[in-house]
Image (cartoon, rainbow, N blue to C red):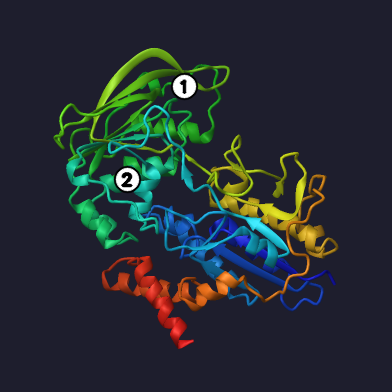
Amino acid sequence: MPPPVKLAIIGGGPSAFYVASRLLSLLPLKDPMSPPLRVHMYDRLWAPHGLVRYGVAPDHPEVKNCTNKFDATAIDPRFRFFGNVNVGSTPLHSIPHALHLPLTSILNNYSHLLFATGCTMPTLHPAIPPSVYCIPALSLVHWYTQHPSQPPPPALDKITHLTLIGQGNVSLDIARILLTSPSVLRQYDVPEHVLEVLSRSTVKHVSIVGRRGPLEAAFTTKELREMINLPEASMVPIEPTLLTPPSGVALTRQQRRTLELLQKGSKNLPGSTPKSWSLHFYRSPASLTPPSSASALDMVNLTLAHTRLDPATHSAVPTGETSTLPTSLVITSLGFHADPETTFFDPALRHLRSSAGRITSPDGSALKNMYASGWAANGAKGVLASTMIDAYAVAGTILSDIAPSSEAVTTTAPPSPEMEMAPDELLNRRPDLDALPAEIVHGIKDGMVTQYDDWKVIDAEEVRRGGALGKERERIGWDEASSFIARAAVIN
């Protein structure tokens, strides 16, 4: 039988749960050939599921169905979840109540380690840094999903025109939320305090700016179709020449459908609705000029550089022309990158230094029994399905290390590339399987660390409160959640 395995997973989002689920299912509890196994998951957020809870748009509840699988994973007695725990070299300032756990405590207590920490930092635009007039999209998403970092609500009652920089799904999510009546959003997982702010919104128009053309736009046809069918908003028609593909270019199915939808236009006629939206192609921010007075009604001037597509590189290059777009607020939605303070962060990659699921040293050799999956390993790209495929591949790599002769390895794991292993071992080869880091033991006792049973109690309470309001759920913040945990700690 292989030696005992004690795996720590840092991160509690989809990638983390998919790896845990795969390993636990391929090494059944009652199989005598399975090694003694423990999987302990640590997340800096008090609630599990990462972007599924704090990133998915509230009016897309079907995307959250994967949490049923995650719940099934958590039932396995070999699995434990520890939330509100920040693993790293420094305390987490954005979430001050998170318990700080030095990485050395993980290294001393575990034989294997997986980083599934995602990409938690917004990519900013150098020409328009954050200010009172320009905020990252992540701040708005964290506001309407009640993220523990508690960003301030936007002053929507003082805004008439909002501009989004970037044409991905996150931009369309934000535009859709702002252009949809709160009476429609009320049935979904939107906190009451968010609905209250949305009900006072004076936003009349949303501009969505992209540096390339419609064929390169990152949004999906599903998201675009939802925008086109908004009941209380209409789309400004697009110049027909922009929707004519270059001759000789073979369109993908998605590109063809995108052009068809844009040519058709919105369900509502332009000008027939109280709100509207527009797509601005071949434009890139150049500067942002504050209003000349302190009046809240004054708009900022967003200078946009005109661009064209370089046929050789397909990148946007400036034409030398510019135009000005008056707007109340600019929101940048340009993707995400890993936290530079994360161990093994590679500044050139903007995510963790890894290859084929293995954490690597600067010289490219693999660090023994240390892995990375999901956005932490590959950058912020892909959807839940691709995240699952990547996670299963990484689970196969881990499995090939802990049980190389296992039938599960030979039948499910793709062949791993040959990699040189670094000579140093950073982890504990013979950890106590059921022991926890001392900081976690004290954190549980003090009610500072959430476990999965705590989460299920809170989850049920959120659903109960939501049901009373005729909605999917009503979210609970950390202050209330911690009181649930504290009461449970007293009872137990």
| Res 462 → quadrant | bottom left
Above/below status of 147 relative to 436: above
- Residue 315 in picture, x, y percent from top left: 52, 22
* Towards the viewer: 219 or 50: 50
Contact flag, marks 1 and 2 (Cβ < 8 Å): no
Amino acid bearing label 1: Pro
The residue labelled by disc 1 is 245
In-image side of 225 versus 204 (left or right): right
The label number, if any, that marks residue 176 in the structure image: 2
- Residue 129 in picture, x, y percent from top left: 37, 33
Above/below status of 488 relative to 276: below
Q: Secondary structure at mark 1?
A: loop
| Res 427 → quadrant | bottom right
- Residue 138 in picture, x, y percent from top left: 40, 46
* Towards the viewer: 463 or 146: 146
| Res 14 → quadrant | bottom right
Tell me the CA gap for discs 1 and 2: 27 Å
Residue under the point 38% across and 66% down: 478
Mark 2, other Cα within 10 Å: few <14 / some 14–19 / many ≥20 = many
Q: Secondary structure at mark 2?
A: helix
Would residue 183 be visible to someone looking at this image?
no
Specify which label sits upstream in the sequence, 1 or 2.
2
Q: Quadrant of the N terminus?
A: bottom right
Would residue 136 be visible to someone looking at this image?
yes
Mark 1, other Cα within 10 Å: few <14 / some 14–19 / many ≥20 = some
Residue under the point 79% across and 58% down: 400
Amino acid bearing label 2: Arg
Residue under the point 43% across and 16% down: 318
- Residue 461 in picture, x, y percent from top left: 37, 75
Between marks 1 and 2 in the image, the one whose residue lies nearer the viewer? 2
